[in-house]
Amino acid sequence: MKAVRIHETGGPEVLVYEEVPTPSPGRGQVLVRIEAASVNPVDAAVRGGAFPTPKKPPKIIGSDGAGVVAVVGPDVVVVKAGDEVFFQGLGIGSEGSYAEYALVAAEQCVPKPESLSFAEAAAMGLVFPTAYYALVRKGGLQPGETVLVQGASGGVGTASVQLAKALGARVLATVGGEEAARQVRDLGADEVIVYKTSDVGAEVARLTDGRGVDLIHELVVSENLPADIGMIARRGRIVCTGQGRRPEVAVPIGAAIGKDASLLFMSTSNAGRAGIAEIMREIARLAEQGRIRPVIWKTLKLSEARTAHELLAEHHVGKIVLVP
């Protein structure tokens, strides 16, 4: 089969499209014929060596995807050959999804919503579970609360905006430009702030009559966390998902204590395979109801993975998807 592997860490140039042996499923595994795999920042981090993984090069990268179960391994009863599924969680301790076939644990496979194409299902894989875990599992979002999504035009950001709206929140969002603002409004954001031309703190104060927001989903922690403390309401929560450019950030302790603030850090890997699959089933239900939808920016061939990773660094709204 064809796959995209790294033999060493580095820039997009280390991605190699090559022939590799087609694997066979072991106990508890299924072999999925990949119809689409999405491209995520974590894939770039693995490629570049910023995210050390138990599985060492040479390795196939890619964390999520969608396809058709081709072969089931011993003791697998939850899925069968021919089932259309989507999944996330590959490429860390295992081979990834940038391939024509991938081994997936049976418990990771979730039925693909009939209303979605394979590309759309793949585009939901990592970002919607991350947003759901942040808003619901960590943030405890309640209907009627006000949410600020910091960095709303990326994959997780567009998912977070849609989920917060679907769950009954008032949604504020920050983006970098007017075109992104228009697109994020179309996804359901009630108010969008262009951070390059506006004072975000002042706008949040104006839009909330000085009260602040109940919950911030922060996707650029190192750049925004100090300002976030000033934008939450008393007893507000900040869920920290994306590190940003720096590994550390200073927190204004006095302001945080004065707000009775909750700073919550998260990684979906802590939910475990079964936990993520449970979240993905809830996401599939919301997708079937038409309450959320994946946002695809570009679809490229698997052989164009290098180009996809180069594009990943550009400003865009939504996901990049690879198809065999």
Image (spheres, rainbow, N blue to C red):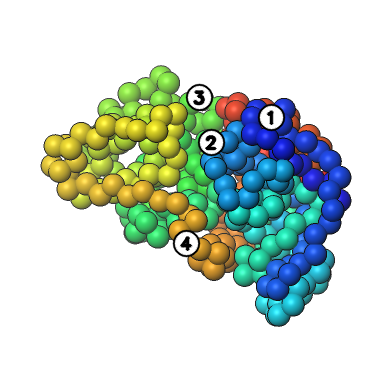
Secondary structure of the residue carrying tag 4 is helix
Residue located beneath label 1 in the image = 12
Picture coordinates of residue 122, whole percent (x, y): 68, 52
Q: Is residue 104 left or right of residue 139?
A: right
Mark closer to the observer (1, 2)? 2
Residue located beneath label 3 in the image = 177
Q: Hey, what amino acid is under mark 4?
A: Ala
Secondary structure of the residue carrying tag 2 is loop
Q: Hey, what amino acid is under mark 1?
A: Pro
229, 100: nearer the viewer: 100
Q: Distance between the Cα atoms at labels 4 and 3?
A: 34 Å
Total labels: the figure holds 4
Which numbered disc flags the more N-terminal residue, 1 or 3?
1
Picture coordinates of residue 264, whole percent (x, y): 32, 50
Residue located beneath label 4 in the image = 271
- Mark 2 and mark 3 in contact? Answer it, CB < 8 Å: no
Q: Distance between the Cα atoms at labels 2 and 3?
A: 28 Å
Which numbered disc flags the more N-terminal residue, 2 or 3?
2
Q: Hey, what amino acid is under mark 3?
A: Gly
Mark closer to the observer (2, 3)? 2
Mark closer to the observer (1, 3)? 1
Q: Residues within 10 Å of mark 3 (few under 14, many from 20)?
A: some
Secondary structure of the residue carrying tag 1 is helix
34, 179: nearer the viewer: 34
Which numbered disc flags the more N-terminal residue, 1 or 2?
1
